[in-house]
Image (tube, coloured by chain):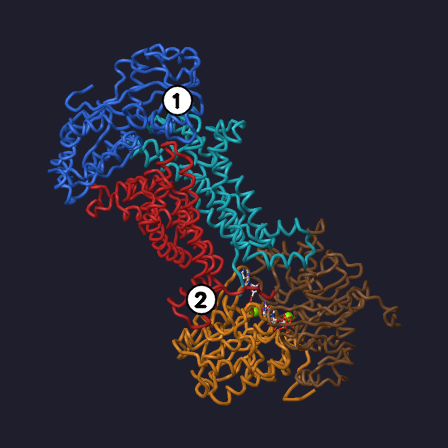
Chain colours: A cyan, B red, C brown, D orange, E blue
Amino acid sequence: MNVIEKLVGSLFSDVGVYDAIRVTLCMSVCSTLLSSAIGIALGLALERFSFPGKRIVVRVNRTLMGVPPVVVGLVVYMLIMRRGPLGFLGILFTVRGMILAQTLIITPIICGMTYSYAVKTAPAVRVFARTMGANRRQTSILLVREMKYELYFAMISGFGRSISEVGAVMLVGGNIKGNTRTMTTAIALLKSQGIFHEGLTLGLLLLVMAFVIQCLADFLRREVQEEENY
Amino acid sequence: MNVIEKLVGSLFSDVGVYDAIRVTLCMSVCSTLLSSAIGIALGLALERFSFPGKRIVVRVNRTLMGVPPVVVGLVVYMLIMRRGPLGFLGILFTVRGMILAQTLIITPIICGMTYSYAVKTAPAVRVFARTMGANRRQTSILLVREMKYELYFAMISGFGRSISEVGAVMLVGGNIKGNTRTMTTAIALLKSQGIFHEGLTLGLLLLVMAFVIQCLADFLRREVQEEENY
Amino acid sequence: MRTTEETRQSFAIRMRNVEKRIGEFQLKIEDLTLEEGRIHGFIGGNGSGKTTAAKLMMGILSPDAGTIERKDLGPRDITMTSQRPYLLHDTVYANLVYPLRVRGRKPEESQVRALLARFGLEDKAKQYARSLSSGEQQKLSMLRALIFEPRFLIIDETLSNMDPESVEQFEEMILDIQKKNPVTWVIISHRLSHVYRLCDRLHFFSRGSVLASGTGDEILFKSSEPEIRRFMSKEMIRSGSAES
Amino acid sequence: MRTTEETRQSFAIRMRNVEKRIGEFQLKIEDLTLEEGRIHGFIGGNGSGKTTAAKLMMGILSPDAGTIERKDLGPRDITMTSQRPYLLHDTVYANLVYPLRVRGRKPEESQVRALLARFGLEDKAKQYARSLSSGEQQKLSMLRALIFEPRFLIIDETLSNMDPESVEQFEEMILDIQKKNPVTWVIISHRLSHVYRLCDRLHFFSRGSVLASGTGDEILFKSSEPEIRRFMSKEMIRSGSAES
Amino acid sequence: VAAQEGAEEKGRLMMATTTSTADTGLLDYLAPLFLEDTGWELQWDAVGTGEALKMGENGDVDIVLVHAKASEEEFVENGFGVERFPVMYNDFIVVGPKEPIAATDDIEAVFTQITEDQLSFVSRGDDSGTDKKEKKIWAALELDPTSNEQYVESGQGMGATLTMADEMQAYCLTDRGTFLKLKKDADVSLELEIVCEGAKDLLNQYGVIAVNPEKYPEVNNEAANAFIEWICSDEVQELIGEFGVEEYGQALFTPNAGTDN
Ligand SMILES: Nc1ncnc2c1ncn2[C@@H]1O[C@H](COP(=O)(O)OP(=O)(O)OP(=O)(O)O)[C@@H](O)[C@H]1O
Ligand SMILES: Nc1ncnc2c1ncn2[C@@H]1O[C@H](COP(=O)(O)OP(=O)(O)OP(=O)(O)O)[C@@H](O)[C@H]1O
Ligand SMILES: [Mg+2]
Ligand SMILES: [Mg+2]
């Protein structure tokens, strides 16, 4: 461990790269899983239930897919700062605070994508589930299974967003070296020091990591050959 | 015009809000349209053609969906700086440079979403198009038409990303007041000055704008009632 | 005010004054009673409302007005095969055992394989279900509905793309079930000869309502309704178990 | 080494030593010649390769080996209606005129409406196509194939969910076209009586190859193949234009 | 004469500068005057010191205004800049909670106490002018700040670092201008107080350098020279000295063109 740490660390200026990798992974995986759980549930629920103002909710959701991270960062900051309503949690400048902010950013994305897929898929699945005598829970599970390719893609998109995010994480995490510094905030720091090449190298490392994680995830998924007979 | 300018401007500290709104709109609409054109074409082509290493390309595409904006910012900066290979264009610290950076960020997103939709939709459409005697161009047009709901969603997602982006725009545009300052970079500036409430207000204004634009876009789309008979 | 008929034969599903509007189409069923343990045939022109009525019975659609009584039939006791079978994005086997899974029953591998073999699908257990040929898809859809022994089944044109041998096999299977442990069937089909052979009662749909109900002979041969007579004239029906 | 038959009657499509493997399934057609201006019927069990052969003819699939000759047939002259009709996410009208659009031809509104009216779809021009009933969807699919007057058509089980009246209407339409301006047809169907009545030649598929080709009588009544005889025994066929 | 020149607009002067000049509003205050006096429109990109110098090195800006004397001199030595002109200074102060450090002018005592008592301290850690100054003090005291577990590096600009220090109730080395500006304008009002000011050798000297036109012929050297001449002029120096007095009760910057720290 120590050897790798030294090796990776030595490639870069003193920004604490090794810790940044650890923090980045922890944060993006946690927030992706969290917001997948919430986003998929919300997306399916949004498709499932009709209520007045639903169209507005759908549009608000889509709008929130493009909420500027720095705005989310500000909101979370003001919630969890010492004098804020959630100040007692003491999660400002911690990875947990960063996960919270990221979850708020990514959840609308996963929710929106889930909804947009479900609108196409769910009616047929629901009719089928009814004919098979599935109860509500089983119907939801079935729907998720039938949309697994799409939901996986939504999760990958969320993960991409989470690993690349910098605005909210910088504000809420504080970019504290060895603690809440992520690869992206480290890149931003290198950039502000005018050390562009190292920033780029670190960016490349981030992309390679994201690629590898995705390959692993792809590997874990069982793929069925899906040629249809029209 | 002047009245609105004064009114909006007066709400905020001297960050040049009115110009920032103009720049934000121009930049995000242009880059969304550009990357939609490129991303959709690439996504469809990726689905259409088989070649060795295609799976890798698909994964690289997905990885690039999560490329950190600040990295793209660095790359574009190094391309278009005076000494860079594209320095002769003289688009550093201009809105055009920002559009270039944004297009690079958003295109993979739209391409990836298009591809993932096309994989599901295209085989059946292509078989159908063949039976109807459609040529290549007509088949592509048909495919786009059949995926219009999904592609619209991809464009909305791209727009969301483009309107909320800050890292690349800041670096390439330089956050020059009245010139290349966008709403997000203005928010970042206000944030760094500790003026959080104005940052939030401006963020809200941005979201409202995004919402309105989306409603307009929704309005322009003709929607058919799409209840199927299973 | 019960009639003798009703006392003798209890119903499985009864629709009373049911109305349902979908787009321009209006379904209006004053009284449609499906007796328990019988095979009912729904016939009638395209777009006459057969599938809509079936969906109402299944609870897939809910009526705008009227009542639908289901006697002793919970959601787990009824099933319907669709005119466009929905197959899971999975293997044939996974599709077939799905209703068992829903009921928490463990499929017996050997039994399932025997069932597949009986309909010529033995080599296809692991094939992606949606790559089956049209007739094979319908067979799978039928087997999936039959595997959990439901007490009320609606078969919505699910034999239409099967070859004559398979159709006969399924007909035998249906009659077999009726001999051993009668359940209630609704068979929607345009193949009048099959319907005539299989069904205890026929219900003729026309423009959103049930024009006539009765035995096969009553409807197909003795009806005085001009519409039914015209409908009938287009298809030859073999009565009894004649061989060609 | 031309036979008299071949000289007299030119072919529209000829498949020679065609092989195609899809998953476990192997299609192998030594010689399948479809004469021009004739109605050909493809019959055979489910999964015997009828649809696969049709897709090869259409160029939707390409063969692993062998040759498929299409005489004077460009991609705009041929069409196929699918066993699972693909309907555009659009109105009935838009679906119907799509092939005209493709050919840069302007649809004549009144003519299109007349066509719809002939098959009872007059009120449905503006309906979302995928909300049609199963038989209506097939009708739309048929009309869409016929509207641009193709010279080679494959009808893959597209009459299976239609009511007897509509089936007869389409049969009449087909025979009508053949009288006026003969084109080449392939009709894939499991309704042997219709196939027998319509087709000039039948091709019997079995396990991926063409077991026999010939006239209706040759195949259905005079064949000595045990498989064909068994197949036939399940369905009664009315020959000629008998009325019930 | 100046007013007449202002009638025609000549073009833009692109400046890379540190966040402090922008965040305090000094440039917003000067730019319109500069346009009026000379006809050049001043535009700036406020970034980290390193980034600002990098942009100068790449020839992407016409002029830099930063505060990191050693780096600036290196910049000129390497031929990227023409000449360094001192413009103004403000001073560094240590801010933090009133307890346990009592207000003093002895920076060495403050830093020693922070390390020995393991008090919270937020360092910028971004190699900026302020950061370099801080590192220099630790080095002079032969103290290892990282031995203090409460010592964190924020890797961000001065404004963000101050906000963090306030939130964490930590000590922080800052330039006076940014602190005053934040103390007054931030809507989460800073609780931090000045605990050390007036120590000698805590001056924060700003220098302005035109990017070398011999290296980059494309740069707007004419405007850059005009700016240097303008900002070093007595009138403008006076204006700088007045900036902020009304709002903050004291000047944010002390003009000192011609001299140096
Ligand atoms: N969403 C809808 N909007 C408008 N009309 C609809 C909709 N859904 C169904 N219909 C119409 O309702 C009518 C009845 O449909 P239904 O599926 O019940 O017919 P069917 O008797 O099953 O016909 P088929 O024998 O062709 O399957 C059809 O004419 C159909 O076009
Ligand atoms: N992608 C695939 N993978 C494996 N097997 C396949 C695939 N596609 C088709 N098959 C098999 O090929 C066989 C031939 O299919 P085809 O659709 O040609 O049959 P068909 O004669 O049209 O039958 P039907 O009358 O049921 O429509 C079927 O047994 C089918 O299961
Ligand atoms: Mg129906
Ligand atoms: Mg077939």
Nearest to the observer: residue E15 or residue C235: E15
Placement of B103 over or under E60, stated as above or below:
below
Label 2 secondary element: loop
State which quadrant residue E182 falls in. top left
Q: Residue at x 53, y 76 (%)?
A: D142
Crowdedness of circle 1 by 10 Å Cα count: few (<14), some, many (20+)?
many
Chain letter of the residue beneath label 2 in the structure image: D
Q: Residue at x 31, y 28 (%)?
A: E247
State which quadrant residue B92 falls in. top left
Crowdedness of circle 2 by 10 Å Cα count: few (<14), some, many (20+)?
some
Report the disc number at residue C184.
Answer: none
Q: Residue at x 55, y 63 (%)?
A: D25
Please state if E98 lies on the left or on the right of E70 as rendered: right
Reading the image, the residue beneath label 2 is D62
How far across and how far down the image is residue C106, in percent? 71, 49
Q: Looking at the picture, do discs 2 and 1 lie on one chain?
A: no
How far across and how far down the image is residue D51, in percent? 54, 70
Q: Badges 2 and 1: C-beta atoms under 8 Å apart? A: no
Q: Is mark 1 within 8 Å of ligand 2?
A: no
The amino acid on which the numbered mark 2 sits, given as a three-letter code, is: Ser
The amino acid on which the numbered mark 1 sits, given as a three-letter code, is: Val
Nearest to the observer: residue E246 or residue D129: E246
Label 1 secondary element: strand
Q: Residue at x 53, y 31 (%)?
A: A85
Distance between the Cα atoms at labels 2 and 1? 69 Å
Placement of B57 over or under E191, stated as above or below:
below
Nearest to the observer: residue B88 or residue C244: B88
Chain letter of the residue beneath label 1 in the structure image: E
Q: Quadrant of ligand 3?
A: bottom right
Reading the image, the residue beneath label 1 is E122
